[in-house]
Amino acid sequence: MNNNFLNIYNNLIKLTRNKNLYENLEVSFYDRMVILFLHLSFLLKNYKKVESKKNLQKFFDFCIRQIELSIREIGYGDATINKKMKDYINLLFSLIDKIDDWELKNDSEKLEILKIYISNMSNGKNLLNYFEKYRLFLSKNAFKSLTKDIITL
């Protein structure tokens, strides 16, 4: 299952690196983390009723370990990594909480949520449309289907 998790995680990274998401934006590492966490949050939200909790927990743990490894590769020390990981996990849980009832919100409420987390929101409507399409994509596909190569929306 670890190989499947790696493929799904890599697809999340590929989606996060989509250059169209960052048109007219000056993005920081933090903004990219927010986009990754939005992808992950929608994925976890969508599959929490379909997949076993144990399997999703393993996937969540796998993603957190991969993020920690990526931060280590940047060159941060252990103390900094622990602090940053705590901040990132709190950010992820905050995002998961905010999108829990995403379908019930109107577009302006959804845009406000995105504005809370992404600093320079000049293309808010594009991001909102993108994440709506992503959410619909997830609802139409099984968790295991995400193990295939790059996902295109």
Image: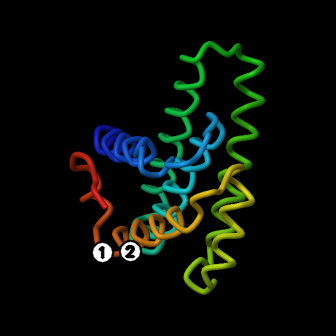
Q: Is residue 125 left or right of residue 113?
A: left
Question: In this view of the protein, which residue sits in the foreground, 95 or 28?
Answer: 28
In this rendering, the answer to whether 35 lies above or below 125 is above
| Element at label 1 | helix
Q: Residue at x 71, y 61 (%)?
A: 115
In this rendering, the answer to whether 104 lies above or below 109 is below
Q: Position of residue 18 (x, y in %)?
A: 40, 46
Q: Residue furthest left?
A: 148
Residue at the disc numbered 2: 136
Q: Residues within 10 Å of mark 1 (few under 14, many from 20)?
A: few
Q: Position of residue 117 (x, y in %)?
A: 70, 54
Question: In this view of the protein, which residue sits in the foreground, 106 or 23?
Answer: 23
| Element at label 2 | helix
Question: In this view of the protein, which residue sits in the foreground, 39 or 114?
Answer: 114
Point out which mark residue 114 bears: none
- Amino acid carrying label 2: it is Leu
- Amino acid carrying label 1: it is Lys
Q: Nearer the viewer's eye, disc 1 or disc 2?
A: 2
How much space separates mark 1 and mark 2, taking CA atoms?
Answer: 6 Å
Q: Position of residue 124 (x, y in %)?
A: 59, 63
Residue at the disc numbered 1: 140
Q: Position of residue 128 (x, y in %)?
A: 53, 68
Q: Residue at x 29, y 67 (%)?
A: 142
Q: Is residue 104 left or right of residue 12?
A: right
Q: Are marks 1 and 2 in contact (CB under 8 Å)?
A: yes
